Image (cartoon, grey):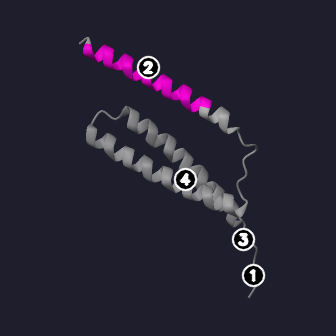
């Protein structure tokens, strides 16, 4: 029998799968933020979490195979600085929401 080289390599298929997971995560995030029914919101939150878990597993596999390399690693100090900034913004936003909800 004649063995043919597959059109798409395994690496390309997994990369495409990862891209689909990222797109799905974006769509689920939008659905979560726009859902007005608590049950629907909870369903989309679970789908988002499942998708993020699959995305992480896929990324880890690709990284182990040497298929996914980041261009450069950020300094841990800079990452921590950004995390603190986002946490502060989140805290301020939560305070603002609580103040406005309390005014009603």
Q: Position of residue 5 (x, y in %)?
A: 76, 73
Verify whether residue 83 appears in magenta: yes
Q: CA distance from mark 4 to mark 3?
A: 25 Å
Q: Nearer the viewer, mark 1 or mark 4?
A: 4
The residue that disc 2 covers is 92
Crowding around mark 4 (Cα neighbors within 10 Å: few <14, some 14 to 19, many 20+) is many
Q: Position of residue 15 (x, y in %)?
A: 65, 56
Secondary structure, mark 2, is: helix
Q: Nearer the viewer, mark 4 or mark 3?
A: 4
Instruction: Give the magenta range.
Output: 81-102
Of labels 3 and 2, earlier in sequence is 3
Secondary structure, mark 4, is: helix
Residue that sits furthest to the top in the current view: 103
Q: CA distance from mark 3 to mark 2?
A: 54 Å
Secondary structure, mark 3, is: loop
Which residue occupies 66% across, 39% down?
A: 76
> Disc number at residue 6?
3
The residue that disc 4 covers is 55
Of labels 4 and 3, earlier in sequence is 3
91 vs 78: above or below: above
Q: CA distance from mark 1 to mark 4?
A: 32 Å
Crowding around mark 1 (Cα neighbors within 10 Å: few <14, some 14 to 19, many 20+) is few
Of labels 4 and 2, earlier in sequence is 4
User: If the image is split into quadrants, where does the N terminus sit?
Assistant: bottom right
Secondary structure, mark 1, is: loop
Which residue occupies 58% across, 58% down?
A: 58
């Amino acid at each position: 029998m004649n063995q043919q080289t597959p059109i798409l390599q395994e690496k390309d298929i997994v990369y495409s799968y990862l891209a689909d997971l990222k797109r799905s995560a974006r769509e689920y995030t939008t659905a979560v933020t726009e859902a007005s029914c608590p049950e629907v919101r909870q369903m989309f939150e679970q789908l988002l979490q499942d998708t993020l878990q699959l995305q992480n597993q896929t990324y880890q596999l690709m990284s182990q195979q040497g298929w996914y390399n980041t261009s450069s690693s950020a300094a841990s100090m800079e990452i921590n600085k950004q995390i603190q900034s986002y946490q502060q913004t989140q805290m301020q936003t939560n305070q603002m929401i609580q103040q406005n909800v309390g005014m009603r």
